[in-house]
Image (spheres, grey):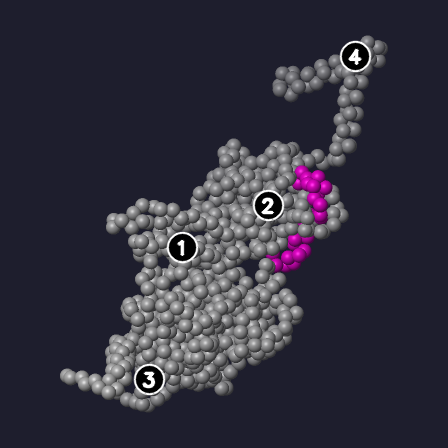
Amino acid sequence: MSLRIGGNGRSEMLVLMLVVATTFRLCPLVKARPLCRIRTLRTGKVFPVEEKIQGDRLYFSSGKTHLIKHPCKKNLALYLGRQIFLTKDTFESSLIPFSIPTSMQVGTPEVTSAHFAGSVLLLVVNQKVYVYDYEANFWTASTGIQHPVSHVSGDNCCYSGNSFCMDISNSVFAYLRGDQVSQANIYFSNSRGYRFQKYTQERRAELVGTFGGIFSFHSLSQVGLLLVDEQMAMFSYSDHPLNRSFGLPFDYDRALDILIAPGLKGILIFWSEKNLLVSRNSGQLVESVQVREGQRILYNSIVKANITIHSVAANENELAVLTEENNLYYGSLGIQSSSLIKFADQNIWSQEAVLMFTDVGMLEILTPLRDVLFPAFDFQKCRLNIQALLMDPQLQAGVCKVELLQGEFENKMYTIDMNSQLELTALMIPRPGTLPVPLVSVSNPHSLGLQAVICEDGYTYDGNTKHRLNISLKQQHHWGRADPNFTSSIKRPTISTITLDIANKEISCVDLKPLTALISVGCDLEKKIVIQNEFSACYHGVLDPVALQDNYSYIIEREAYDPNFQGQQAKKDLEVHYPYEKLGCPLLAYYDIPWKPVVELWREGKFQEVVEAEYVLLEMNGLFTYTYSLTAGTAGCSAQPQNWTTITKMAGDTASFSWDRENYMSCHDPNYHEPLRWPDVPYQILGGQTENKVVFDQRNGIYIFFISIVDPSYSYCRLETTFSVYVYGAFPLSIFPPEITIVLLTAATLLSVWLAYMIPQLLHTEQGLEGNGFWVRLYQRCRKSGACLWGRC
């Protein structure tokens, strides 16, 4: 090829160079490989059939498409659009549009909100809540809601077999968005949405603004209300210490959909067609998502990027956005600020398309396809491997500086009870020549405190340095470094997540996900209390263990017990069967020596310590033949102490044994202001700072005691048990009063002394001699009569 340059040769050369340069610059985009590989899922279709859909076909009210994945059951998902589809295999088969039975009589089958609550799906249809048990294929309407609602909200905990985890999944709110927050009708359910009740919150009447929603922020142990006022929004929180202030305000110029990222880390995603915001601390701070190109920030917010968002998807650590401009954005939900990068423009958008994460770094663009011959829809999937796409040098994603980040605590759940500490370890291996900085954070710093130490821990086979991270966790109260106005109430169990990530981690670290664990600051179910019984009544031979096991029973006199636990005599004696299988052989106690049990704390079958906390006792059969060595005055109470009578009145008919850590108030607490009116009443609390003991009446027999640890600062658990005591050494009570007995004994003693003196004196007188002769003759006659009786006469 020849090239002629003349006259305007320089201009022609410049134009040619620009064309060549432009051609070379655009070439990678024109010849770029497809973002994903498209495949169509079509199953179960052989012969054409007429469309037969049972019930009323549901549809989503919003103009956008949504997809809700079950956080725990990864194959379960709900597609919301002009058609609604429920899948149990991540749309790997053709599906008939989702419908509700006509027997539900929903009227207009318009869905405005949906939520997976454990094993059920909740749908708001025509301003009412319906529950669909997808395992049993059963529909029912929720009860207890008296007003129209538009939305439901909740979260899921995926650690099975734990009671507090089940409580998280069972908790659901239902509400109508748009009312004034002080007048909004809010309903709460702790039964996965089957039954609702009116929800009330302190200070809600004082709040100003439009009600934008209510959410359970379990990772912060708070309930958050979204307040909207003059195109700004903020969160109000339910409990100390956050209930005294609000979250920082953020822009809210139009209604935002709120997506709670799975994992219970407190990550919220707010989005509309023109905006995208993220919060990593349950709404306390809401930030705009930036758009980057390499290390350079193109836009500080999505608003400035001038794009129209069509679909948003998120998993525990990743975020993806599909726009109507055929753009796909991807970002990481790391500890630090979030940002997105844009992949090459390709024809990937459609009105029905929706994004769905199937695994870490694996994203799908899902589109339902109508079939004119069959009622079931097929599904088109465009699958993206994010890690492979980020290898494109034009994206300037950088190289991940960490080769390995692992810890034995990843995706596990732990419990920290009061006065307990948890030790965790993690291993980090950086890429040679780099020094990444690990970051440890907790979602609820008001409750859970941490301390982390990093040190070198040897080398790998190829010479890389290994770094070990030691993390110590315990209640924020016990670190002693936080102001009381910062910490949450120590009496209230809380939840927090701990996350270990890398500071300023490159977006290319797709497979290097943060390490996360769920921490329950609450009851350790492995704990229990045991009453020390080294010297039992059987050990000393007082009772026979064989007899106790042979349906042993004993009688309690009616004067000694009250079935109503009020200290009043019963009308008849009580026969009690002794439960040897449960109680074993009773402890032994001498009636005349003040006594208290030795309480031991055990965990997972191992002895931990002797319990010194405050506890109470109550005889389970109503025996009241015992008291206490201290009174309210001698125990040093500054307020009137509680007792079983006052606690039983407070509880009503709910339970007789209802004194526990939740309703106990110490009479030594300066915040307890009950006046000390009766200082002479028995002080019924044992343990703690007093030397109080049980004093038994003069009565032998078996006592079966219920014991409850009431000290609210010892454990979040309701540490309770029953045990038995055999009291011995008491002589039977006298029939007569002691005063009469003493007088009679004194008189009898004096009479005996007088007779011992007078009788010898009388024997030497004439009357004495005659009396003596009379007794001698009487004796001889009796002796002779006895001899005749035996035939000796």
Which marked residue is nearer to the observer: mark 3 or mark 4? 3
Q: Name the residue under label 2.
A: 615
Q: Rounded to the nearest whole Å, what is the CA distance between mark 3 and mark 4?
A: 131 Å
Quadrant assignment for the C terminus: top right
Residue 791, image x and y in percent? 62, 19
**630 part of magenta stretch:** yes
Q: Nearer the viewer, residue 91 or 108?
A: 91
Q: Rounded to the nearest whole Å, what is the CA distance between mark 4 and mark 1?
A: 109 Å
User: Circle 3 sits in a helix, a strand or a loop, which is it?
Assistant: strand
Residue 294, image x and y in percent? 36, 68
Quadrant assignment for the N terminus: bottom left
Which marked residue is nearer to the observer: mark 2 or mark 1? 1
Crowd around label 3: few <14 · some 14–19 · many ≥20 (10 Å): some
Depicted 475 relative to depicted 607: above or below: below
Q: Could you tell me which residue is drawn at 51 percent across and 58 percent down?
A: 444
Q: Which of marks 2 and 3 is nearer the N terminus?
A: 3
User: Circle 1 sits in a helix, a strand or a loop, which is it?
Assistant: strand
Q: Earlier in the sequence, mark 3 or mark 4?
A: 3
Q: Name the residue under label 1.
A: 438
Which marked residue is nearer to the observer: mark 4 or mark 1? 1
Residue 131, image x and y in percent? 47, 75
Q: Could you tell me which residue is drawn at 50 percent across and 52 percent down?
A: 449
Q: Nearer the viewer, residue 552 or 382?
A: 382
Q: Name the residue under label 3.
A: 369
Crowd around label 1: few <14 · some 14–19 · many ≥20 (10 Å): some
Q: Rounded to the nearest whole Å, what is the CA distance between mark 2 and mark 3?
A: 67 Å
